[in-house]
Image (cartoon, rainbow, N blue to C red):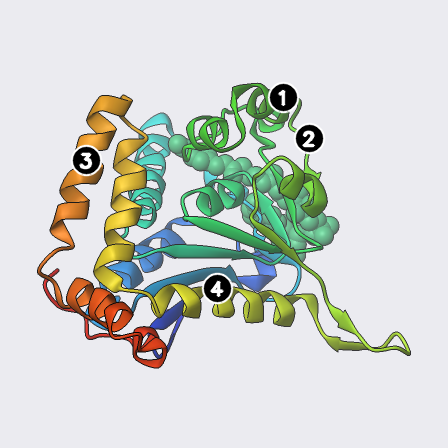
Amino acid sequence: MEYILYEVNGAVATITINREKALNALNSQVLDELNETLDNVDLATVRCLILTGAGEKSFVAGADIGEMSTLTKAEGEAFGKKGNDVFRKLETFPIPVIAAVNGFALGGGCEISMSCDIRICSDNAMFGQPEVGLGITPGFGGTQRLARLIGAGMAKQLIYTARNIKAPEAYRIGLVNQVVSAEVDEAGNVVKSAKEALMEAANKMASTIAANAPIAVRNCKKAINDGLQVDMDKAIVIEEKLFGDCFETEDQKAGMGNFLEKDKEKKLKVVPFKNC
Ligand code: DAK
C-alpha cells in the first residue's frame, strides 16, 4: 500500500495514514487503502486498534482539497459515500479504536478522529471544522458526531465560526480524553518527542483494553454505540442482551473464576478469543 502502514504488536494494531507531504490529507486512494486495511485486521488476535498520522505535525489535515476542487456533483457524492462508509466502518468496528492525534485534525481529520472510540492527542494538536470557509458543510459526519460528543451549542459555535481549537480547549470541552506532552529533562532537552509520548500513551491505553475480556469489551462498545441511538427503555434491552451474551463464554468463566479463586495474577492473563 502506498499511503497506509499497518503494524501489529501482540493484541494491539496500529494503522498509520502515511501521506506526510500533504499532511496526511484524505484522498480517494487513502480512503480505499484504509478500507482494505480494516477489512484485513485479524479480529481473532487483535483486540484494540490505534489510528494515527505519519510525522509530528499532522494527524489528518482534512479531505484532499486539490482532489475535491474539481469534483462534479456526482463525483462529490461518490467521494462522500466512500469516506462515510470507511468512517462508519471504524465507528462500528468490533474492537475499540483509539485515535492518536499527532497535530492537525481539521475537517475530515477531526471527523475521522470522532469516528474512533477514544481520542488522545499531543499538545500540538489542533482540531476544527473549517468547511464553511471553503463553501461546504462538514461532509464526513462532522455535524452529527461533534454535536453528539460535545453538545449541540458548542458544536454549532465551532462549525459556524470555522474556528480551530488547540489541544487544551479540545480537552476542556470533552473532544479529547487525554493530552500528552513531550518529555524534557532538567536541562530542557527533549528526551521524548510529543509524538513518541503520544504513541506510548496510546499503546498503554490500548494494552490495558486488550488485557480485559475481549468479548465483554466488544459488547460494551456495541451496547454504548447502539444504545445511544434509541430511547432508554430500548437501550436497556440492548444492554441486557449483550450482558447475557457474555455468559457461558470462556471470558466470563475465567474472569469470575479467577476472582473467586482470589488469583490476581491469573485474572490479568489474557484468555483466548472465542465464542464471538
Ligand atoms: N488537502 C490537500 N493538501 C493539503 C491539505 C488538504 N486538506 N492540507 C495541507 N495540504 C498540503 C498543502 O497543500 C501543502 O502541500 P505542498 O504545497 O507542499 O505541495 C502541504 O500539505 C503542507 O501544507 P502547508 O504548506 O499549508 O502547511 P502549513 O503548516 O503552512 O499549514 C495547515 C498547515 C493545516 C494549517 C494548512 O495546510 C491548511 O489550512 N490546510 C487545509 C486544512 C483544511 O481546510 N482542512 C479541511 C479540508 S475540507 C465531503 C465529505 C467530507 C469533506 C468534503 C466533502 N462530501 C460528502 C463530498 C471534507 C472536507 C474537508 O476536510
Q: What count of labels does the image hold?
A: 4
**Picture residue at 59% right of the left edge, 62% below the top:** 21
Instruction: Give the mark nearest the N terminus, 1 or 2.
Output: 1
Q: Secondary structure at mark 2?
A: loop
In the displayed structure image, the side of residue 43 where residue 64 appears, left or right: right
Choose top left, top right, bottom left or bottom right for residue 56: bottom right
Between the residue at mark 2 and the residue at mark 4, the CA separation in whole angstroms equals 30 Å
**Picture residue at 51% right of the left edge, 64% below the top:** 202
The residue labelled by disc 1 is 157
**Where 153 sits versus 179, above or below?**
above
Between the residue at mark 3 and the residue at mark 2, the CA separation in whole angstroms equals 38 Å
Callout 1 touching callout 2 (CB < 8 Å): yes
Which corner quadrant of the figure contains ligand 1? Answer: top right
Hey, what amino acid is under mark 4? Met
Callout 1 touching callout 3 (CB < 8 Å): no
Hey, what amino acid is under mark 2? Arg
Binning the other alpha carbons within 10 Å of mark 3 as few (below 14), some (14 to 19) or many (20 upward) gives some
Residue lying farthest to the right in this orientation? 187
Instruction: Give the mark nearest the N terminus, 3 or 2.
Output: 2
Between the residue at mark 1 and the residue at mark 3, the CA separation in whole angstroms equals 33 Å
The residue labelled by disc 4 is 205
Between the residue at mark 1 and the residue at mark 2, the CA separation in whole angstroms equals 8 Å
Callout 4 touching callout 3 (CB < 8 Å): no
